[in-house]
Amino acid sequence: MDEKIYFKVLKLFGNKGTRFTTDDLARELGTSKRTIYNYFASKDEIIEKTIGFVFRDMHQADERILKDDSITLPEKLKLVLENIPDAYNLGAIIRHKDDLQRFYPNLWDEVNKHLNEAWDDLLELIEVGIHEQELAEVNTEVLRLMLNEALRKLLDYEYLAQKSFSFESGMKAMYDIILYGILKR
């Protein structure tokens, strides 16, 4: 039932931001508030665990990729780059960042922490590739900055609407640039 709860919270969060109620969640789940409070102590905890759910899945998939010795370094890079949380799930949280910052600043800090750590596995893989001389030497801190800022911008629905492209196409363009560069092949 946990995943079902998290997906319903994300749906409510996407529609109402932090203003959804436990009554709303109970209605979505077809259960009672009391049942919800058997799983969570508070609305804060509901939001906090939902945020954790979104990022935990991504990190676990990255770990599986990194530990698989049958996958080559270029394949691992591609798979890790493609392994970004679904735009809707992550976007539902980011879209209401103003509410999170104002009403739940500790949870917004948690989102930022996760966003800043989202690239750790990829950068570790790149550093291994650099060390083993399979990849060109790059400044991974600058790369982290580029990835962080690009991800945040690609999660901004107003920006995407203005530029007329999707989160998915923006992410694909970003990882194509990272993997293949800008020089003609």
Image (cartoon, helix red, strand yellow):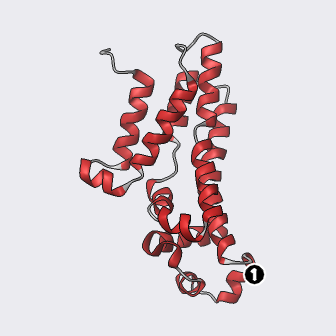
25 lies above or below 147: below
Which quadrant of the view contains residue 29?
bottom right
Taking the spot 47% from the left edge, 34% from the top edge, the residue there is 146
138 lies above or below 145: above
Quadrant in the picture for the C terminus: top left
* Residue 88 shown left or right of residue 158 in the figure: right
* Residue 26 shown left or right of residue 163 in the figure: right
Asked whether 133 or 61 is in front, the reply is 133
* Residue 72: x %, y % from top left: 58, 22
Taking the spot 29% from the left edge, 15% from the top edge, the residue there is 184
Local secondary structure at mark 1: helix
162 lies above or below 12: above
The answer to whether one can see residue 119 in this image is yes
Taking the spot 65% from the left edge, 62% from the top edge, the residue there is 106
* Residue 10 shown left or right of residue 68 in the figure: left
* Residue 117 shown left or right of residue 158 in the figure: right
How crowded pointer 1 is (Cα within 10 Å; few <14, some 14-19, many 20+) is rated as few
Q: Residue lying farthest top?
A: 133
Which quadrant of the view contains residue 66?
top right
What amino acid type should be assigned to the residue bearing mark 1? Answer: Asn
* Residue 99: x %, y % from top left: 50, 69
Taking the spot 51% from the left edge, 45% from the top edge, the residue there is 84
The answer to whether one can see residue 164 in this image is no
Q: Residue lying farthest front?
A: 102
Quadrant in the picture for the N terminus: bottom right
* Residue 18: x %, y % from top left: 53, 73
Which quadrant of the view contains residue 25?
bottom right
Disc 1: which residue: 38
Asked whether 82 or 49 is in front, the reply is 49
* Residue 147: x %, y % from top left: 48, 36
